[in-house]
Image (spheres, coloured by chain):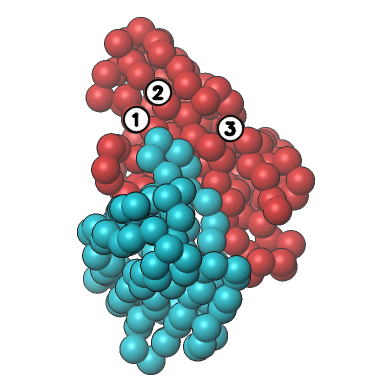
Amino acid sequence: GAVVSQHPSRVICKSGTSVKIECRSLDFQATTMFWYRQFPKQSLMLMATSNEGSKATYEQGVEKDKFLINHASLTLSTLTVTSAHPEDSSFYICSARDSSGGDADTQYFGPGTRLTVL
Amino acid sequence: GQNIDQPTEMTATEGAIVQINCTYQTSGFNGLFWYQQHAGEAPTFLSYNVLDGLEEKGRFSSFLSRSKGYSYLLLKELQMKDSASYLCAVRDSNYQLIWGAGTKLIIKP
């Protein structure tokens, strides 16, 4: 099946620093990738849709200057949390849409990145 | 507005069968997905339905009725490792996934 990797899996940083999270589709090309955050015992919240070669589309309420997204290739999207604060601590999950036609355009998820801001 | 409803929590016994229901009201419909999510992990894809009827994959089956805005996930021969949250998601006319809040399934020996 399609595999999506995410790095790092866990990061602890000091308040005010920036953190970059990578999302890679390993065995398929993904023109579209999605970034979610999930708080404990809550469902996934879509933050932004990342399109290869163009600007990301952010959901309402998500600050694009704080959560920088770059989708430079068909297999890599990055999310940078700039000037992180404790309230940014969360589980960040990326997914990639397999547009090859198989499995009905399914989204496959990376394993997630747990960010803790001290 | 768009809405996905599924029970918050269900309990079942190891070896038994459980059915998790999902009802939806969305602007358009381009398929329904079921995902499994273990605590602290990302969701994993289980099934996809776009036409009415039952899709079977081993111990898991998923059913869809588009006219009723209804789906269920059926898990047979339950194992302890099936304890997880099960997320129902519908792809709307804009090809966006609308997520349910998830059903936490507790399996007891």
The image position of residue B22, as x and y in percent, is 33, 72
Q: Chain of mark 1?
A: A
Chain identifier, cyan in the render: B
User: Dot 3, crowdedness within 10 Å: few (<14), some or many (≥20)?
Assistant: many
The image position of residue B75, as x and y in percent, is 45, 67
Q: Are marks 2 and 3 in contact (CB under 8 Å)?
A: no
Chain identifier, red in the render: A
In this rendering, would B61 be left or right of A71?
left
The residue that label 3 is drawn on is A6
The amino acid pointed to by label 1 is Ser
In the foreground, B17 or B15: B15
**Residue at (45, 17) in percent of width and height:** A11
In this rendering, would A33 be left or right of B81?
right
The residue that label 1 is drawn on is A90
The amino acid pointed to by label 2 is Leu
User: Could one spot residue A15 in this view of the protein?
Assistant: yes
Whole-angstrom CA distance, mark 3 to mark 1, is 15 Å
Q: Are marks 2 and 1 in contact (CB under 8 Å)?
A: yes
User: Dot 1, crowdedness within 10 Å: few (<14), some or many (≥20)?
Assistant: some
Q: Are marks 3 and 1 in one subunit?
A: yes
The image position of residue A70, as x and y in percent, is 58, 34
The image position of residue B99, as x and y in percent, is 36, 60
User: Could one spot residue B32 in this view of the protein?
Assistant: no
Label 3's element?
strand
> Sequence order check: which comes first, mark 3 or mark 1?
3
Q: Residue furthest top?
A: A14
